[in-house]
Image (cartoon, helix red, strand yellow):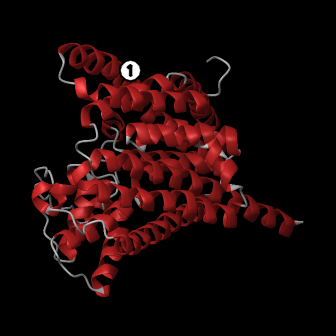
């Protein structure tokens, strides 16, 4: 095992977790399996690894973002990168949900499903915050409180402001800039150490998922799950790779091989935030993406990139409409796309954002909100796929922006000669 690359170890952990979880599912109620396999082995390995990852997310994001912003030495450049990043995520979200609506209408996941046979979860619709409130919540009233609570958008805002001020102070803040650079190196080294435990953590997380859920929960909504995954795979392996080829001139096959570890981690944890450390490490080591780019695009993408979520919502909207025999017009579908794209930005960083976004989309076109209860019954299964797509999107965006910026800088240098 020592000679294997981390990517291969992670994949082995994933496969073994699926096999062990599926095999032990029929015995999950037995005291030994329940107490020692689920409650001890899977829980200790999975949650232990997840807590280690969460431990370094905030200090890593803060240190890397301050370092990256300060290294730009140009506030205008930061604005340029920010606009390009936002445009990338908004365009790909729109493409994702349009493909999801079209695909779901062709494959018809809701046809033939008997409503009485479907397990429902209780759902109480929550009212989303106004767009103004969301914008105001980005500004921390107490930055230390934001760091402690892990409020990612507030951490990003404060880190960028700190980096900008360091740039404006110039030589006066050189020592402070050096301190953040050293802190960033410290965090990256810690990431390398923690990621050696990833195969064991993924084994525990995925094993517990399959031994707890099994296949029984999937059967009634199998058509919804299958169609959603088909469209997620299409977006992640086709749409993103076309953009990567056009704008970054990268080989999609080579790219996918290099990001297998972050993809596997995303699938196992269902957490984009948990993938931040490994994503930053992969971009630096495998793609030579500059820290000043990745330290901005990855944390921002983690909070506002909702491509996977938007695809699920597109399929869910069509699925619920078909299930309740409600006809949706072209105008309705246009409103679904518009609502999902705007909501992905407007609800960024809000807990339970996927459910809030789906309730907004359904309400917009007059579909019963009770339908969300059906989707929540299999949300954990679908969440693994949509998180993976979100993480692929963050990585593709980072490489694309990095390559575009390098070409822009090369042209600027050539023009100055």
Could you say which quadrant of the image residue 127 lies in?
A: bottom left
Which residue lies under the disc numbered 1? 45
- Report how many numbered discs are placed on residues in the image: 1
* Circle 1 residues within 10 Å: few <14, some 14–19, many ≥20: some
Quadrant of the image for the C terminus?
A: bottom right
In the picture, measured across the screen, residue 269 lies left or right of residue 244, that is left
- Percent x, y of residue 337: 35, 74
Image: 228 above or below 173: below
What residue do we see at 27% from left, 21% from top?
A: 38
**Where residue 249 sits in the image (x, y, percent)?**
73, 61
Q: Nearer the viewer, residue 301 or 145?
A: 301
Q: Which quadrant, please, contains the N terminus?
A: top right
Q: Quadrant of residue 278?
A: top right
Of residue 178 and residue 44, the one placed in the foreground of this image is 44
Tell me the quarter of the picture where residue 84 sits. Answer: bottom right
Q: Closest to the observer: 244 or 182?
A: 244
Determine whether the residue tagged by mark 1 lies in a helix, strand or loop: helix
Query: Which residue is at 13% across, 69% downward?
Result: 368
Residue 73 to residue 291: above or below: below
Residue sitting at 38 percent across and 45 percent down?
Answer: 384
Q: Residue at x 13, y 55 (%)?
A: 117
Residue closest to the eye, 417 or 39: 39
Q: Is residue 200 visible?
A: yes
Give left or right: position of 145 versus 127: right
Q: Position of residue 225 (x, y in %)?
A: 33, 55
Q: Position of residue 45 (x, y in %)?
A: 38, 20
Residue 70 seen: no
Residue 30 is left or right of residue 69, and the answer is left
């Amino acid at each position: 095992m020592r000679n294997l690359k981390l990517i291969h170890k992670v994949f082995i952990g994933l496969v073994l977790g699926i096999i062990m979880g599926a095999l032990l599912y029929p015995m999950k109620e037995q005291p030994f399996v329940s107490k020692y396999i689920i409650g001890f082995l899977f829980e200790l390995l999975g949650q232990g690894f997840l807590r280690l990852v969460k431990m370094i997310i905030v200090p890593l994001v803060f240190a890397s973002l301050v370092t990256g912003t300060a290294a730009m030495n140009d506030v205008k450049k930061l604005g340029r990168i920010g606009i390009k990043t936002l445009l990338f995520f908004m365009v790909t979200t729109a493409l994702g949900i349009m493909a999801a609506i079209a695909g779901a209408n062709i494959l018809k996941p809701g046809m033939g499903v008997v409503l009485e046979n479907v397990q429902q979860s209780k759902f109480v619709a929550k009212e989303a915050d106004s767009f103004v409130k969301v914008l105001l919540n980005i500004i921390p009233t107490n930055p230390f409180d934001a760091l402690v609570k892990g409020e990612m958008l507030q951490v990003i805002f404060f880190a960028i402001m700190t980096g900008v001020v360091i740039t404006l102070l110039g030589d006066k803040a050189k020592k402070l800039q050096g301190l953040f650079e050293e802190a960033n190196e410290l965090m990256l080294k810690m990431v390398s150490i923690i990621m050696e435990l990833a195969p064991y953590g993924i084994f525990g997380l995925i094993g517990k998922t399959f031994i707890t859920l099994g296949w029984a929960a999937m059967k009634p909504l199998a058509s919804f799950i299958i169609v959603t995954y088909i469209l997620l795979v299409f977006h992640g392996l086709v749409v993103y790779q076309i953009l990567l080829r056009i704008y970054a001139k990268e080989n999609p096959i080579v790219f996918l091989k290099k990001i297998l570890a972050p993809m596997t981690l995303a699938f196992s944890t269902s957490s984009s935030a948990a993938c931040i450390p490994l994503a930053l490490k992969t971009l630096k080591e495998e793609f030579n993406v500059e820290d000043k780019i990745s330290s901005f695009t990855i944390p921002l993408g983690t909070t506002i990139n909702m491509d996977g979520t938007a695809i699920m919502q597109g399929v869910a909207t069509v699925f619920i409409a078909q299930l309740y025999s409600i006809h949706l017009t072209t105008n309705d579908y246009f409103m679904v796309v518009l609502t999902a794209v705007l909501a992905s930005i407007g609800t960024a960083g809000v807990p339970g954002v996927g459910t809030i976004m789906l309730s907004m989309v359904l309400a917009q076109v007059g579909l019963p909100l009770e339908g969300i209860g059906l989707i929540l019954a299999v949300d954990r299964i679908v969440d693994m796929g949509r998180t993976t797509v979100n993480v692929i999107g963050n990585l593709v965006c980072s490489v694309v922006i990095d390559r575009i910026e390098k070409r822009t800088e090369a042209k600027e240098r050539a023009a100055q000669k």
